[in-house]
Each structure stands twice: as C-alpha cells, then as structure tokens.
Image (cartoon, rainbow, N blue to C red):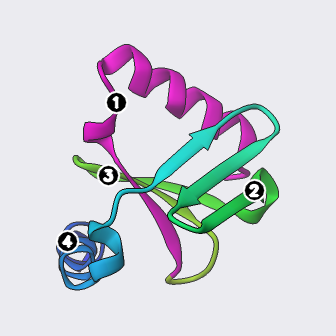
Amino acid sequence: MVFVRIIVVPRIVFKRQPNFKEEYVVSFNEENIIFNAGDINSTISWDYYKEIKESKEFIFLKYGKELHTIIPKRVFRNKEELNEFKSLIKSKINK
C-alpha cells in the first residue's frame, strides 16, 4: 500500500496533469520558496510545509494530508547539490 501511495500514484497524477508538463521554476533559499510558472509568481513561506517524504525519484514537500509539492530528483546536477537541498529542507520543515 505504501509503495502505491508513494511511487505509483504520484507518477499517475503527474502524467495526467497538463499543467505539470509546462516548465516552471522553483527556487529555495533560507527565507522562503519562490515559484514561477508563466504568469504565476508566488513566494511561499517555509511554514507552509509540514512534512518531508522521499522516494527513489522524488522529494515530496507535504502541506496537507494528500497535498504536496513534488520535486523530481533529476533536477539536481549531482548528489552534492541534492544533499545540500535535503539539508536545507530538513532544517526548515518540521518533521
């Protein structure tokens, strides 16, 4: 059941949503998260996210029971960059 929720469902949802196929940029820094997609520009406080989950291919920043922002691990240039990101989010998001 956990496998289906963490691996299978996100892939299905991702493939079915045309908005997910558009390019968007998410920037993370010590103060907040900046989301840019076309005409949408948002600044999100770290307090918005409540939990971190991780699969082989994705990092999930959860903000509700079934609501989350999905960060594909493929966007990081190398393991060092991925580990730096994971350290940042772990320092900002309550477990």
Q: Nearer the viewer, residue 65 or 13?
A: 13
N-term mark: 1 or 4 = 4
Left or right? Give the position of 40 relative to 74.
right
Foreground disc of the pair 1, 3 = 1
Residue at which label 1 appears = 76
Circle 1/circle 3 CB separation < 8 Å:
no
N-term mark: 3 or 4 = 4
Residue at which label 4 appears = 11
Q: Is residue 46 above or below residue 8?
A: above
Q: Residue at the location (59% across, 41% down)?
A: 27
Q: Determine which quarter of the picture holds residue 43.
A: bottom right
Residue count near mark 4 (Cα–Cα under 10 Å), binned few <14, some 14–19, many ≥20: some
Residue at which label 2 appears = 43
Residue at which label 3 appears = 58
N-term mark: 1 or 3 = 3
Percent of width and height locating residue 75: 32, 37
Does dot 3 land on a helix, a strand or a loop? strand
| Magenta extent | 67-95
Foreground disc of the pair 3, 2 = 2
Alpha carbon distance from label 3 to label 2: 22 Å
Circle 2/circle 1 CB separation < 8 Å:
no
Alpha carbon distance from label 3 to label 4: 10 Å
Q: Is residue 52 above or below residue 79?
A: below
Percent of width and height locating residue 49: 68, 61
User: Disc 2 marks which amino acid?
Assistant: Thr
